[in-house]
Amino acid sequence: ASYRLAEKIGPGQEVPRASTTLSPRGAKNALARCLDKEFAIAIERVMQFGKGPKDPIAAAQTAETLCLKPSDDEGRLKYALQLARTAVEEGQKSNDLPYFRMVLGMAEYRIGHYAAAEEALLAVENGHEIDPHLGVISEFYRAMSLYRDGKQEAARELATAAAKKMKPFPGNENNPLA
């Protein structure tokens, strides 16, 4: 499937339901640019796309998309957690297992299971040959989990260490490749 959400939705515009397809893979970028109303529309479509995928990549991408923003929607959070668990269970032999574990940690964090989030995210950080971006993202989510779990000093130290690993912002915002 493809996404055309960003091109179709402008501020204040409605998108006809039949005119837009959406998959989790490209939705993250589109969702990051959407306003709250458009984000809600996109999340509804992502949830429809993800109805019961057994493919661990599709399950993880759907769960990750559902976890991009904080939510009070308990159904959405439980669904994201179910999908993330499916991805980890079905993807045990996959090279993408660290990604699946990161998404599980994100889902556990969003639903408020901070100790479980820390465990899943620590597994990512301790994994072998992981993508460095997964490690940094996992460290930030783990820092947020530690903070929410009342371990503010450990959270601060972890977040500071993770920030040092990040590539700095471009010096010239008009020419980000400079």
Image (tube, rainbow, N blue to C red):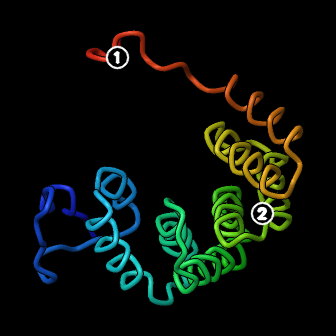
Q: Nearer the viewer, mark 1 or mark 2?
A: 2
Q: Amino acid type of disc 1? A: Leu
* Res 145 quadrant in image: bottom right
- What's the residue at 88%, 40% (across, down)? 154
Mark 2 secondary-structure assignment: helix
Q: Is residue 31 left or right of residue 58?
A: left
- What's the residue at 80%, 35% (across, down)? 156
Percent x, y of residue 175: 28, 15
- Using a 10 Å C-alpha cutoff, classify the residue at mark 2 as few (fewer than 14 neighbours), some (14 to 19) or many (20 or more): many
The CA span between labels 1 and 2 is 35 Å
Q: In this view, does 157 lie to the left or right of 81?
A: right
Mark 2 and mark 1 in contact (Cβ < 8 Å)? no
- What's the residue at 33%, 17% (across, down)? 173
Q: Amino acid type of disc 2? A: Ala
- Using a 10 Å C-alpha cutoff, classify the residue at mark 1 as few (fewer than 14 neighbours), some (14 to 19) or many (20 or more): few
Q: In this view, does 169 lie to the left or right of 149?
A: left
Mark 1 secondary-structure assignment: loop
Q: Name the residue under label 1.
A: 177
Percent x, y of residue 4: 19, 62
* Res 98 quadrant in image: bottom right
Q: In this view, does 93 lie above or below 133?
A: below
